[in-house]
Amino acid sequence: MVREVFSSIHRRYDLLNRLFSLRRDVAWRRFAAGKMHFFRAHRLLDVATGTGDLAIETARLHRNIGVVGVDFVRPMMEMALMKLSRHRLSQRVLIVQADALNLPFPDDHFDVVGIAFGIRNISERSAALAEMMRVAVPGGQVMVLEMHFPKSPFFSWFYRTYFVLVLPRAARFFSRNPAAYHYLADSIADFPTPKAFVDTMQATGLIGIETYALSFGITHLYVGLKPEKAAEGTGAETRLGRR
Ligand SMILES: C[S@@+](CC[C@H](N)C(=O)[O-])C[C@H]1O[C@@H](n2cnc3c(N)ncnc32)[C@H](O)[C@@H]1O
């Protein structure tokens, strides 16, 4: 179902993203890229890369790294490839077809493993986080950027109205598959609270988790660290947590 949704909206995905988020999505990815540290492998993995926006944003900000983006929907990947060529980044950013639950990379391979607006489409969230952690180097970052319904009553009301009244109409106007946008709106509503999501990250084994609420909490950036192997159970949590 997820494959079908994204195959049907790939052409308008970027336009509608910018429109529905009032272009905040660009700033959110930029913020995430600014929090990334490349210290060992100098490699980023962008999971569920879609049309490649996080991969592109990061490659432009960190000029000495190599980037791999993975997705399992071919039409979205083709959009990413076109954009990479436009940005002259085809040499530095590789796009690979793969499932987030079975990443075709060795253990301990990337300094940063990120996923932007993708984890809510994956029902086995803990398994996806565990797989992201596996391919991160010890001490590396696992980053999740995701949308939530905001807590404040006013913004919550505004946001729900927007999703119930504005978005479905706009989707009908712009897209041949408005049901896809209903699915996307529902997937935001069904996503766990920030506290519950941090608990899931912790249960996966990530440590030193930091959370950033962006644009009144509409979006959160979560940054967790993969524990250092040699120091496991010997205070690594405290040391890494202060970085
Ligand atoms: C909402 S888009 C996000 C795209 C991009 N990361 C961004 O920032 O705009 C979600 C993407 O996740 C991909 N996706 C969902 N489940 C996946 C999985 N299990 N493995 C790989 N990609 C997946 C979809 O194909 C889609 O391209």
Image: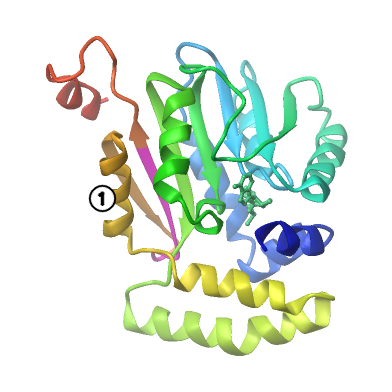
Query: Relative to 166, is 102 above or below?
Result: above
Residue in the image at 82% along x and 41% along y:
83
Residue in the image at 84% along x and 28% along y:
88
Q: Amino acid at mark 1?
A: Asp
Bounds of the magenta segment: 216-223
Image spot of residue 141 (x, y percent): 41, 29
In-image side of 14 versus 202 (left or right): right
Image spot of residue 39 (x, y percent): 45, 14
Name the secondary structure under disc 1: helix
Residue in the image at 68% along x and 84% along y:
168
Image spot of residue 34 (x, y percent): 49, 35
Quadrant where the N terminus is found in the figure: bottom right
* Front residue of 68 and 105: 105
* Front residue of 60 and 137: 137
Q: Main secondary structure of the magenta part?
A: strand
Quadrant where the C terminus is found in the figure: top left
Residue in the image at 79% along x and 58% along y:
7
Whether 82 is among the magenta residues is no
Badge 1, how many Cα within 10 Å: few under 14, some, many 20+? few
In-image side of 200 versus 214 (left or right): left
In-image side of 186 versus 78 (left or right): left
Whether 220 is among the magenta residues is yes
Q: Which residue is mark 1?
A: 199
